Image (spheres, grey):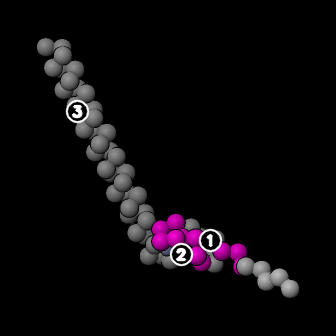
Amino acid sequence: MTEKIPQHRHCSKCGKAFLGEERFCSEECKVSNSELLKKRKRQLLILYGMTVVVLIAALLFVGV
Ligand SMILES: [Zn+2]
């Protein structure tokens, strides 16, 4: 007698096992994860912008 473990996934946010096809166990995890992604994207943009500014400043400094 073999007991089959039902098809389950682990939440991409909290890692909890749950049944279903979603990536997250709950709407709460889904929302908080998308907010985290948004925040991370913004941080990346800021970092990118700062890099560009520093590069331009360095170029100007060298060029003068
Ligand atoms: Zn979760």
Near-viewer residue (46 or 12): 12
**Residue receiving disc 1:** 9
Instruction: Establish whether ligand 1 lies closer than 8 Å to the Cβ of label 2.
Output: yes
**Circle number at residue 24:** none
- Position of 33 compared to 54: left or right? right
Residue count near mark 1 (Cα–Cα under 10 Å), binned few <14, some 14–19, many ≥20? some
Distance Cα–Cα, label 3 vs label 2: 42 Å
* Foreground tag (3 vs 2): 2
Residue 30, x across and y down, in percent? 47, 70
Q: Is residue 57 above or below residue 43?
A: above
- Tags 3 and 1 touching, CB below 8 Å: no
* Name of the residue lying farthest toward the top: 64
Label 1 secondary element: strand
Give the residues in magenta.
6-18
- Position of 16 compared to 40: left or right? right
Main secondary structure found in the magenta portion: loop
* Foreground tag (3 vs 1): 1
**Residue receiving disc 2:** 16
Q: Is residue 9 magenta?
A: yes
* Name of the residue lying farthest toward the left: 64
Label 3 secondary element: helix
Residue count near mark 3 (Cα–Cα under 10 Å), binned few <14, some 14–19, many ≥20? few
Quadrant of the frame with the N terminus: bottom right
**Residue receiving disc 3:** 53
Label 2 secondary element: loop
Q: Amino acid at mark 1?
A: Arg
Q: Amino acid at mark 3?
A: Val
